[in-house]
Image: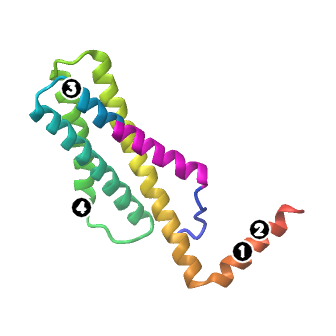
Amino acid sequence: MNNFINRPTSAFIAASWVALLTGALGFIIGLWNANMPLHEKGFYFVILLYGLFSAASLQKSVRDQLEEIPVTAIYYALCWVSMAVCIVLLLISLWNAALSMSEKGFYIMSFLLSLFGVVATQKNIRDLNYLRLQTEMNPRRIKHENSAQDDDTFE
C-alpha cells in the first residue's frame, strides 16, 4: 500500500459532495418536471441509481487492485461492463426520446457530473478512512511525521 496518501483538502471534499448532489438532484428535478410517462421517468431514475452504484463499485475495485487487495477478474470485468451498460442505456434512450436537444444535453451532463461526484466522494471517504486507521494504529509515528513536515517548512 502506498504510505503517502495525503489527506484530501476540505475544498476538494466539499467540491466532490457538491458535484454529486448537484448532478443527482439536477437529474431528479429534471425528471420531476419532465413531460413524459411515469414508466419512462422510472427508467431514467433506475439508470441514474445503476450508474452511481456502478461508478462507486468500479472505483472501489480499481483502488483495491492498487492496494493489492484481491479482486476477482469476473467482478472487475463486471464493474467495467456495468459502467458501460448504464452509459449506453442512457445514450440510447435519450437518442430515441422525444425531448429537445437541450433537455437531452442536460440529462447527459447531470448524469456525468453525478458519476464524477460519486467517484470523487468514494475516493475521499476511502482516503480519510485509511488515514484514520493509520492514526489509530500508530498515532505517535503520524504525529512525529507531521511535526517533521512542519519543521521542514521553516527552512
Dot 4, how many residues are within 10 Å of its Cα: few (below 14), some (14-19), or many (20+)?
Answer: few
In the image, residue 152 lies at what x, y percent?
A: 83, 65
Q: What residue is shown with label 1? A: 145
Mark 4 to mark 2: distance in Å? 40 Å
Callout 2: 10 Å neighbours few (<14), some, many (20+)? few
Of the residues shown, which amino acid type is indicated by label 3?
Leu
At which x and y percent is residue 32?
24, 32
Task: Name the amino acid, label 4.
Answer: Tyr
Viewer-side residue, 66 vs 138:
138
Dot 2 falls on a residue whose secondary structure is helix
Distance, label 1 to label 4, CA atoms, is 37 Å
Mark 4 or mark 2: which comes first in sequence?
4
Quadrant in which residue 148 is drawn:
bottom right
Cα separation, mark 4 vs mark 3, equals 28 Å
The boundaries of the magenta stretch are: 9-25
Within 10 Å of the Cα at label 3, are there few (<14), some (14-19), or many (20+) other Cα atoms?
Answer: some
Residue extending furthest toward the top: 100
Give the spatial CA distance, label 1 vs label 3.
52 Å
Q: Are marks 3 and 2 in contact (CB under 8 Å)?
A: no
Q: Earlier in the sequence, mark 3 or mark 2?
A: 3
In the picture, the disc for residue 94 is: 3
Q: Is residue 21 above or below residue 39?
A: below
Q: Is residue 108 above or below residue 58?
A: above
Instruction: Look at the image and say whether residue 44 sits in the magenta stretch.
Output: no
The structure residue drawn at horizontal position 53% and vertical position 49%, both measured from the top left corner, is: 14
Q: Counting residues from the N terminus, which is met first, the one under dot 1 or under dot 3? A: 3
Of the two numbered discs 4 and 2 in the rendering, the one whose residue sits closer to the viewer: 2
Circle 2 residue: 149
What mark, if any, has residue 75 been given in the picture?
A: 4
Q: Is residue 70 above or below residue 38?
A: below
Sort mark 1 into few (<14), some (14-19) or many (20+) by Cα contacts within 10 Å.
Answer: few
